[in-house]
Image (cartoon, rainbow, N blue to C red):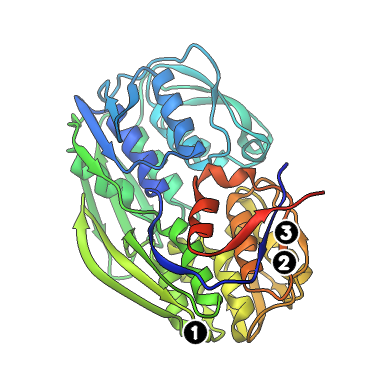
Amino acid sequence: MTRFAGRSGNALIGRTKVPGDKSISHRALMIGAVSIGRTSVSGLLEAEDVLCTAVALRALGAGVEKMGQDWIVDGVGVGGLTSPDDILDLGNSGTAARLLLGLMATHDLTAHITGDHSLRSRPMNRVIDPLSRMGAFFHARDGGRMPLVVHGATEPIPLEYEVPVPSAQVKSSVLFAGLNTPGTTTVIEGEATRDHTEHMLKAFGADLDVTVADDGVRRISLTGYAELEARDVVLPGDPSSAAFPGVAALMVPGSDVTIENIGLNPLRAGLFETLQEMDADIEITNVRDQSGEPVGDITFRHGPLTGADIPAARAPSMIDEYPIAAMAAAVASGETRFRGLAELRVKESDRFAAIVDGLVACGVPARADGDDIVVTGQGGPPPGGAEVHVNLDHRIAMAYLVLGLASAKPVTIDDAAAIETSFPGFLELMTGLGADIAPVGD
């Protein structure tokens, strides 16, 4: 384990880019793998999570390799995946696990799947249940936990499925299963979740239709056996990664940071809306379309932040950004309430507890109120001075290093290794902007 600490010091200044969007990277590889022809992906996130997806797809029969700066996927077509010769190890990636289970569930194959300690603790029943109704068969531990075995359906059954909780992973898993299923597979969601899967499936030629009722309920219907055609994909920068240097700039006096080419999909932009409600100085420019996704450049400037009441309905559009949003709340004036965060308890770690316990350890009043997290901001630098155990969670690790940049005393994390799962180059990017983040001895 490598301990790192974030310390207050210089302002963060400069223009930079963050790696490609993780959610779209997974989907580009997977959809390319079941398309006909060669897909070229520019800007793929070369982090451990996405590389696990690449290795798994290669084992399932698709051609996946890096050529120059781009990644090339030689697809096998819908229905063309085959049983792997060895166990598929998906590392820390819940997205890879749940989406690949959907992709495999309606292929005539058998696959053994595992992951690291964190992934093996995460429940897969939320996708196993609908996929079983489509004809797949699973052997899994309690709660659908890994390691598990999937036997794909030999005669897939179309499904109309209403997701019980907002989840883009569950939605995407069922839609991926529907690609190799006769008839129409429909997913119904009461709250809109990130729609990268719908955008990309349409771009590759899927027969997919989305309708939205007056009450906001969305029906996504996909007709199976449509031939997908390979295409070139240019990925935007990941807004979840941009959150860390961006919020750091808001918190550290004198900072002014511009992050270029950031994805601005409305169903992923909840953090930016939240920060604006907290009176953050944020400017979005150069908005444009890139491979069907809106992108732009975002400038973050230091200034006073104010506590706010963040509604539960925003959770699907910023579910991965609550750890860093809570750090912003720690330096704001007044109370910030983040509502409806039960989902945080089943992420890479129990992020709900990690936010509350870590902030309290750093001298910031924070508490759980049912499924809400309430943070009483310091109106300036929090005390800091704690060591936070990140439990192999990359976003918790990065969030507390950022808090250290704005704290009176350094904030230390016990292990920085997990950061590579989503943000390779994080430490270099942050120090390049002026942040004091460095390893610490025992």
Residue appearing at x 63%, y 84% in the figure: 380
Query: Marks 3 and 1: CB-CB under 8 Å?
Result: no
Foreground pick, 214 / 22: 22
Q: Amino acid under label 3?
A: Thr
Q: Quadrant of the N terminus?
A: top right
> Which amino acid does the dot numbered 1 rest on?
Gly
Instruction: Between residue 426 and residue 307, name the one nearer to us.
Output: 426
Q: Is residue 406 left or right of residue 25?
A: right
Q: Residue at x 70, y 78 (%)?
A: 382
- Residue 179 visible: no
Label 3 belongs to which residue? 412
Report crowding for label 1: few under 14, some 14 to 19, many 20 or more residues within 10 A (C-alpha): some
Query: Residue 167: horizontal and vertical position, in percent?
Result: 46, 52
- Tell me the element at label 2: loop
Q: Which mark is first along the chain, 1 or 3? A: 1
In this rendering, the answer to whether 317 lies above or below 18 is: below
Please give the label number shown on residue 65: none
Q: Position of residue 137 (x, y in %)?
A: 51, 24
Residue tagged by mark 2? 410
Q: Earlier in the sequence, mark 2 or mark 1?
A: 1
The Cα atoms of the two marked residues, 3 and 1, are separated by 25 Å
Q: Which residue is mark 1?
A: 303
- Asked which quadrant contains residue 9, the reply is bottom right
Q: Is residue 125 left or right of residue 121?
A: left
Element type at marker 1?
A: loop
Kind of residue indicated by mark 2:
Pro
- Gap in Å between the C-alphas at discs 3 and 2? 6 Å
Q: Position of residue 240 (x, y in %)?
A: 45, 58
Mark 2 to mark 1: distance in Å?
21 Å
Picture mark count: 3
Badges 2 and 1: C-beta atoms under 8 Å apart? Answer: no
The image shows residue 331, relative to residue 434, as above or below, that is below
